[in-house]
Image (cartoon, helix red, strand yellow):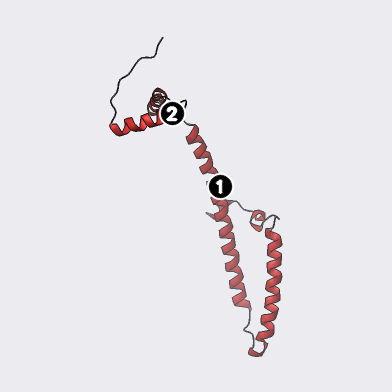
Amino acid sequence: MPKPRANLRLSPKLNNALCAAAERPGVTKTAILEAALQQFLFPEEDRGLEARLIGRMDAFDARQGQIERDVTLTMETLAHYVFYWLTRTDPIPEGERDAAHALGQRRFDFFIEQLARKVSGQVSLADRMPFDHDDLD
């Protein structure tokens, strides 16, 4: 049984775009119009792209949640450290500041080395924390 024929009128702009698209090898005007009508009339059948996008958005949301958890952990850790340091550290007398600065620089360099080793592949502190992301909300 042959396919029924349909006649339609298109705006010049749409007709030009349809003709240009049909010039590609293996593409016909009929195939383009059938695909467009199929998608318009039966949108629930074409869920492939939507399903893939939803999956990617879910993965993005999970990664975003991990980032938010890590940033919250970092901010809390820094805030507690600064609070502790400000409340427990006495001012350094004027004559001892150069020696204290040199010691501080050596300690800071050691800290940076330790941090570089930790970041270069070991399990992060955030991954070791005993709470879920939902606990931070």
Q: Is residue 86 above or below residue 72?
A: below
80 lies left or right of 32: right
Q: Is residue 12 above or below residue 74?
A: above
Q: What residue did someone put label 1 on?
A: 62
Residue 22, position as x, y percentages in the image: 41, 28
Which comes sooner in the sequence, label 2 or label 1? 2
Residue type highlighted by circle 2: Glu
96 relative to 120, above or below: below
Density class for disc 2 (Cα within 10 Å; few <14, some 14-19, many ≥20) is few
Front residue (pair 6, 121): 6
Q: Image check: 13 left or right of 63?
A: left
Q: Nearer the viewer, mark 2 or mark 1?
A: 2
Name the residue at 70% across, 74% down.
107
For residue 100, above or below residue 114: below
Q: Residue furthest top?
A: 1
> Residue 127 occupies which quadrant of the picture?
bottom right
Residue name at image x 30 percent, y 34 percent: 13
| Residue depicted at x 67% and y 55% | 128
Nearest the eye: 89 or 26: 26
Q: Quadrant of residue 28?
A: top left
Q: Which residue is mark 2?
A: 44
Query: Label 1: few (<14), some or many (≥20) within 10 Å?
Result: few
Task: Check the picture and name the quadrant holding the N terminus.
Answer: top left
Q: Amino acid at mark 1?
A: Ala
Element carrying mark 1: helix
| Residue at the limit of the structure toward the bottom, as seen here | 95
Q: Residue 119 placed where, x, y %? A: 67, 59
Q: Position of residue 37 (x, y in %)?
A: 38, 26
Cα distance in 3D space between marks 2 and 1:
27 Å
Q: Which disc number belongs to residue 81?
A: none
Residue 72, position in %: x, y?
Answer: 56, 59
Disc 2 element: helix
